[in-house]
Amino acid sequence: MELIVTVLTDDRPGVIEQVAATIAAHGGNWLDSRLAQLAGKFAGIIAVAVPDQQAAALTADLAALTDVVVHIAAAAAGPPPALQRHTLQVVANDRPGIVAEVSAALAGMGVNVAEMATSVEPASMSGGVIFRATLDLGLRPDQPLAAVVAGLEGLSEDLMIDMPQQS
């Protein structure tokens, strides 16, 4: 059985080891994960394969971890749709609602956001604040990348899109 485990706790040494040891104790196999520290918190999402007969015990033991909020869900049935992956970098002057604007534009175009990382940083020349986002997008064959870029660039005059070399 494949489970998706989400973890949220205060950042401290040993969090990953605690979760990994619990998974291993139940014969689970850590398949894939995204883990990060942000603003003093540690958060992660982990795909785990576990023998069917161990799933309930693993779920209970993960839920019992001290000072760790854990949520477990069954993995989606069937393979994911075949999508072409593209990475875009968005840069604009920071403002309230910019993530809502970008995500609404992508949703309106039916674009799947596989991964998103955002940050704000001081603008060296203007003294303002710059918003940066790295977006890993999944596009269907009928969704041209150029149309997605144009849709995002149309949000505001200061929004720029960079497309790093695809590997």
Image (cartoon, grey):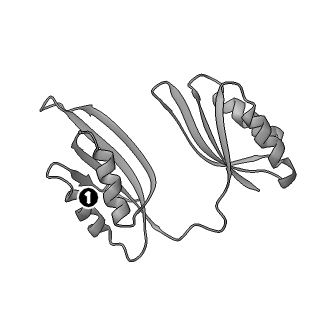
In this view, 21 is above or below 159:
above
Left or right? Give the position of 42 relative to 164: right
Image quarter where the N terminus lies is: bottom right
Q: Using a 10 Å C-alpha cutoff, classify the residue at mark 1 as few (fewer than 14 neighbours), some (14 to 19) or many (20 or more).
A: many
Q: Can residue 137 be seen in this view?
A: yes
Eyeballing the image, is 103 above or below 80?
above
Q: Which residue is drawn at 55% across and 31% down?
A: 42
Instruction: Where is residue 34? Give x, y as percent.
Output: 55, 44
| Count of marks placed on residues | 1
Q: Is any atom of residue 27 visible in this view?
A: no
Which percent across, then down, holds residue 119? Answer: 34, 37
Q: Which residue is drawn at 31% across and 59% down?
A: 105
Q: Position of residue 69 (x, y in %)?
A: 64, 33
Above or below, comparing residue 125 to residue 73 in the picture = above
Q: Identity of the amino acid at label 1? A: Leu
Instruction: Using the image as rendered, state which of residue 27 and residue 60 is in the foreground.
Output: 60
Q: Is residue 144 left or right of residue 124?
A: right
Q: SS at mark 1?
A: helix
Rendered residue at 69%/31% (across/down): 17
Q: Which residue lies furthest to the right in this view?
A: 53
Residue at figure coordinates x 29%, y 44% from the top left: 97
Q: State which quarter of the image contains the C terminus.
A: bottom left
For disc 1, the marked residue is: 152
